[in-house]
Image: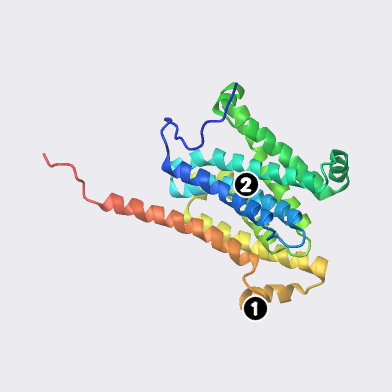
């Protein structure tokens, strides 16, 4: 029988303070949302708000899972890889509870749930994402990886990109009027995917260089702003120049493109900090005794 390893242990079986802290932190949003639901703090439609909150956290955790690779490569912090599986499984758990809460909202009528999934495109998209994450969670153990072989296992787990894209699309469609955070999520996913394209074409070392990270960040931020302007032009008939002008004045608050840029530049700053640390270590005098 294949079981998931205890998430708070490191590879040697010892207690890991970092993994333990992150494991506990992964429960916090669910506990907060559940407490708000139980205390009647989620508005006129508490169950609907609860469903949306859990789904949003599933999407956020999926993005964090995808962030591990570029952050690890930019900072050369190889230990970050050991956090990816735990966060990915947490994302599936949030999505599973999100779906279970939706079933409860439909009075546990599975026939109605099935019909709604078939009839409504955004529900179909979300359900496919759930099935993909279920498959990835079941096959996430070391034992399954050994049985499948490294290459086959990696090809299977590349479906996480499709799951993330479907999850983000599901979130954007159901958001309806308020697309501020969904647009940010799309921009961040775009950054993560474009980084991987650059790494596949130019190599990891060049992709993780601060100059490349900054260039990708600026480019994706511009695409996010252009996409937001295009969306409001099509759906709200807002002049694109008016929206793009809001990026300069900030009269309507911080626009999604700026948030995406800030996120990308934070990773760039982490890469620069790593380079600076490496240079300091290289310049430090050797502590070895003279012969």
Q: Which mark is residue 251?
A: 1
Image x and y of residue 236, in percent? 81, 70
* Picture quarter with the C terminus: top left
Q: Residue at x 51, y 41 (%)?
A: 83
* Identity of the residue furthest to the left in this view: 291
* Picture quarter with the N terminus: top right
Is 190 positioned to the left or the right of 208 in the image? right
Disc 1 is placed on an element classified as loop
Is 242 positioned to the left or the right of 9 in the image? right
**Is 249 situated above or below 178?**
below
Marks 1 and 2 in Cβ contact (< 8 Å): no
Image x and y of residue 228, in percent? 72, 65
Q: Residue at x 35, y 53 (%)?
A: 277
Q: Is residue 125 visible?
A: no
Q: Which residue is mark 2?
A: 62
Which of the 4 quarters of the picture holds residue 218?
Answer: bottom right
N-terminal of the pair, mark 1 or mark 2, is 2
């Amino acid at each position: 029988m294949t079981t998931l390893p205890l998430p708070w242990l490191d590879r040697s079986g010892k207690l890991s303070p970092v993994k333990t802290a992150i494991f506990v932190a992964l429960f916090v949003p669910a506990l907060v949302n559940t407490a708000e639901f139980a205390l009647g703090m989620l508005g006129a439609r508490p169950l609907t708000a609860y469903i949306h909150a859990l789904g949003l956290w599933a999407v956020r955790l999926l993005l964090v899972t995808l962030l591990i690779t570029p952050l690890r490569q930019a900072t050369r912090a190889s230990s970050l890889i050991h956090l990816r599986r735990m966060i990915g499984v947490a994302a599936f758990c949030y999505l599973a509870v999100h779906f279970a809460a939706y079933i409860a909202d439909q009075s546990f009528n599975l026939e109605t749930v099935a019909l709604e999934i078939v009839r409504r495109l955004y529900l179909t998209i979300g359900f496919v994402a759930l099935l993909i994450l279920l498959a990835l969670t079941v096959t996430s153990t070391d034992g399954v990886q050994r049985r499948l072989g490294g290459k086959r296992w990696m090809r299977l787990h590349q479906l996480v990109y499709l799951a993330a894209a479907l999850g983000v699309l599901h979130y954007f469609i159901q958001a309806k009027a308020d697309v501020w955070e969904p647009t940010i999520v799309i921009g961040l996913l775009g950054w993560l995917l474009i980084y991987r394209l650059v790494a596949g074409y130019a190599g990891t070392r060049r992709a993780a260089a601060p100059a490349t990270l900054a260039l990708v960040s600026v480019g994706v931020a511009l695409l996010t702003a252009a996409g937001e302007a295009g969306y409001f032009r099509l759906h709200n008939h807002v002049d694109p120049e008016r929206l793009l002008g809001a990026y300069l004045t900030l009269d309507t608050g911080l626009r999604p493109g700026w948030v995406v840029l800030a996120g990308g530049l934070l990773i760039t700053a982490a890469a620069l900090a790593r380079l600076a640390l490496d240079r300091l270590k290289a310049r430090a005098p050797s502590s070895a005794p003279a012969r």
